[in-house]
Amino acid sequence: MTNLAAFFAHNKKKNGNIKRAVSKNFVDEQGKPIEWEFAPVSPERDAELKSESTKRSLITQGKRKGQYNTDFDHFKYQRLLTVESIVFPNLNDKELQDSYGVMGADVLLGKMLTIGEIAEAAAAAQEANGYEAELEDLVEEVKNS
């Protein structure tokens, strides 16, 4: 028989934030890349991000006329999850956004990082949110390609 007490809230291990240098373009006084910090999002916020990434459209022709298609934009969701997971630097900081001449955390991320660096940040966000096994599978898949 298993010990049910191990599943009580006070016994659950906390998911810590992870730090990763996603860009070589931001360095400290010693010239070392500065680490960005990523935190897991709550399940409630994740549901909101998924909802923001889902589009319903009315079917106007054919046998399914009057019904709805539901399309999930995985790329939009990944970008929103990445932005939401970044806690340092604070992408919502007005002064930081002003320095790039943009408004909004998502737009700022696109100005700060190259597409390769954004992919690195997305991988770190996934790891912070518990997708480690899938990431390892993806790395193996790329290695074997």
Image: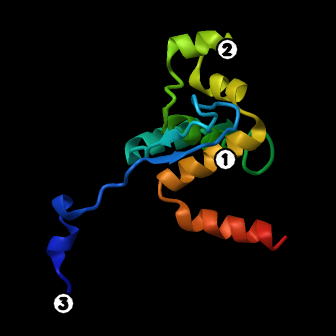
Tell me the residue at 59%/19% (across/down). Answer: 104
- Which structural element holds mark 3? loop
Are discs 3 and 1 less than 8 Å apart at CB?
Answer: no
Considering only vertical position in the picture, is 19 above or below 107?
below
Distance of label 3 from label 1 (alpha carbons): 43 Å
Mark 2 sits on what residue? Answer: 100
- Which structural element holds mark 1? helix
Residue sticking out furthest to the bottom: 1
- Amino acid type, residue under disc 3 in the picture: Met
Distance of label 3 from label 2 (alpha carbons): 58 Å
Residue sticking out furthest to the front: 30
Residue sticking out furthest to the right: 145
**Which mark, by number, is residue 1?**
3
Q: Which of these two is toward me, 19 or 58?
A: 19
Q: Give the image location of residue 62, x and y in percent.
A: 80, 47
Which circle, 3 or 1, is nearer the viewer? 1
Tell me the residue at 70%/32% (across/down). Answer: 25
Q: Quadrant of residue 21?
A: top right
Distance of label 2 from label 1 (alpha carbons): 21 Å
- Which structural element holds mark 2? helix
Q: Quadrant of residue 115?
A: top right
Mark 1 sits on what residue? Answer: 120
- Amino acid type, residue under disc 1 in the picture: Glu
- Answer with mark 3 or mark 2, whichever residue precedes in sequence: 3
Crowd class of label 1 (few under 14; some 14 to 19; many from 20; radius 10 Å):
some
- Answer with mark 3 or mark 1, whichever residue precedes in sequence: 3
Quarter containing the N terminus: bottom left
Q: Give the image location of residue 74, x and y in percent.
A: 66, 47
**Which mark, by number, is residue 35?**
none
Q: Give the image location of residue 145, x and y in percent.
A: 85, 70
- Answer with mark 2 or mark 1, whichever residue precedes in sequence: 2
Considering only vertical position in the picture, is 144 above or below 122?
below
